[in-house]
Image (spheres, rainbow, N blue to C red):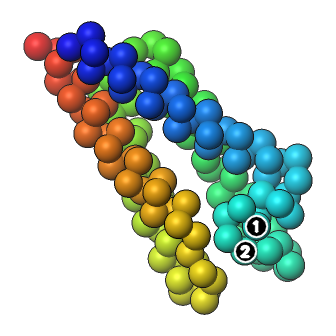
Amino acid sequence: MRALTAVTFTLTLLLILVQVAFAVRGIVDPAAGAMGFGYPTDSATASFYHAVYRDRNLVICVIGLALLFLRMWGALAIVLVTSTTLPVYDIIALMQAGVPVLPLHYVTLAVLVVLSGLTVACAVATRA
C-alpha cells in the first residue's frame, strides 16, 4: 500500500503542477495561454472562455493540492473522478466551434482517468 500511495501522490502532484503552470502562463500571457489551449484570443468571447477555463483549472488545482497534502484520498478521488468530465467538455466545445483539438486534451483525459483509478484505490486501501 505504501508504494501505491507514493506513486499516486507523485503522479497527482505532477499533474497538478503542470496544470498550475498552464494556468499561470494564461494569467501572465493570455494570448500564449490561449494558443496552448488550442485557439487564439482574437475576440472578447474567446478571451473570456479562456479566462474561465484557466481559472476553473486553477481552483481545481488548489483544492487538489490541499486534499493531496492532507492525504484525503476519498475526497481527492471524488475531485479527480468528476474532473474527468472537464476535458471531455473541452474537446466537445472545441469541436463544435470548429477548432482543432490539440492532443494535450486527450492526454489530459487519459491521465485523469488513470489518476482517478489510483486515487480510488488509495481511498479504498486506506479505509481497509
- Marks 2,1: beta carbons within 8 A: yes
For residue 11, the mark is none
The residue located at (69%, 58%) in the rendering is 52
Query: Picture coordinates of residue 96 (x, y %)?
Result: 54, 86
Query: Picture coordinates of residue 38 (x, y %)?
Result: 67, 71
Left or right: residue 42 versus residue 17 is: right
Left or right: residue 73 versus residue 46 is: left
- Amino acid of disc 2: Tyr
Quadrant (top left, top right, bottom left, bottom right) of the C terminus: top left
Residue 13: in sight, yes or no? yes
Residue 1 quadrant:
top left
Residue 39 quadrant:
bottom right
The residue located at (55%, 60%) in the rendering is 104
Q: Is mark 1 on a helix, strand or loop?
A: helix
Q: In 3D space, how far apart are the residues under numbered discs 2 and 1 (Cα atoms)?
A: 5 Å
For residue 39, the mark is 2
Residue 114 quadrant:
top left
The residue located at (47%, 68%) in the rendering is 89
Q: Is residue 97 above or below residue 15?
A: below
Residue 72: in sight, yes or no? no
Residue farthest toward the left in the current orientation of the protein: 128
- Amino acid of disc 1: Met
For residue 35, the mark is 1
